[in-house]
Image: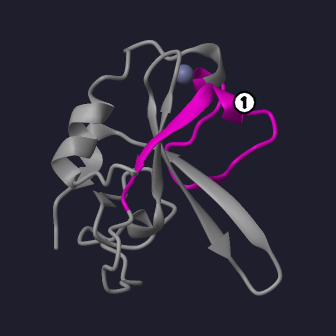
């Protein structure tokens, strides 16, 4: 059974991350959604849960009350909104940095994306 995180639980997890990230985490800036680079060691992060609520109605809306967009480093992490509601939760096994990952399916491509979870950006909007 995969654990489904709510906003509060995600924030608690994200607060575990150490102030100085490990080399793998510190050499990649995933402060906004980015394609996972091949230089990033994916085996160093482990899936610990998901934000995908089973049988939840689809929601493709994004949440940007302050004029951000999906690519903004300060965009809110709104767990009920796209693409967070399609994301899984990963944690670095070395420095406990928390990441979200989801797969973008375009017409001719599949793009695996990642974003680091900054606890102060998590919002609990419905
Ligand atoms: Zn790390």
In the rendered view, tell whether residue 84 sits above or below residue 62. Answer: above
* Residue positioned 34% across, 39% down in the render: 118
Q: Residues within 10 Å of mark 1 (few under 14, many from 20)?
A: few
Circle 1 residue: 41
* Image coordinates for residue 14, horizontal then vertical, percent: 31, 33
Q: Is residue 1 left or right of residue 10?
A: right
> In terms of depth relative to the viewer, which is nearer, 44 or 78?
44
* Image coordinates for residue 68, horizontal then vertical, percent: 37, 66
Count of numbered circles on the image: 1
Q: Is residue 73 left or right of residue 24?
A: left
In the rendered view, tell whether residue 26 sits above or below residue 114. Answer: above
Whether residue 29 is visible: yes
For the C terminus, give its image quadrant.
Answer: bottom left
* Image coordinates for residue 112, horizontal then vertical, percent: 68, 58
Q: Quadrant of ligand 1?
A: top right
Determine whether the residue tagged by mark 1 lies in a helix, strand or loop.
Answer: loop
Q: Is residue 29 left or right of residue 120?
A: right
> In terms of depth relative to the viewer, which is nearer, 104 or 43?
43
* Image coordinates for residue 22, horizontal then vertical, percent: 56, 14
> Where is residue 75, by image quadrant?
bottom left
> Where is residue 41, by image quadrant?
top right
* Residue positioned 31% across, 79% down in the render: 56
Q: Is residue 6 magenta?
A: no
> In terms of depth relative to the viewer, which is nearer, 96 or 65?
96
Whether residue 69 is visible: no
* Residue positioned 52% across, 21% down in the render: 93
> Where is residue 78, by image quadrant?
bottom left
Question: Is the CB of the residue bearing disc 1 within 8 angstroms of ligand 1?
Answer: no
Q: Where does the magenta region start and end?
A: 25-51
In the rendered view, tell whether residue 48 sits above or below residue 78. Answer: above
* Residue positioned 53% across, 15% down in the render: 94
């Amino acid at each position: 059974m995969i654990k489904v995180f709510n906003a509060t639980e995600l924030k608690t997890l994200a607060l575990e991350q150490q102030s100085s990230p490990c080399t793998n985490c510190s050499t990649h800036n995933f402060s906004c959604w980015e394609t996972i680079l091949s230089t990033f060691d994916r085996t160093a992060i482990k899936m610990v849960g998901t934000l995908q609520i089973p049988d939840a109605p689809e929601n493709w809306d994004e949440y940007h009350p302050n004029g951000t967009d999906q690519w903004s480093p300060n965009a809110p992490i709104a767990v009920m909104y796209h693409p967070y509601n399609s994301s899984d939760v990963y944690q670095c096994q070395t420095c406990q940095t928390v990441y979200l990952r989801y797969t973008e399916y375009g017409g001719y491509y599949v793009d695996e994306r990642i974003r680091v979870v900054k606890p102060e950006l998590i919002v609990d909007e419905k």
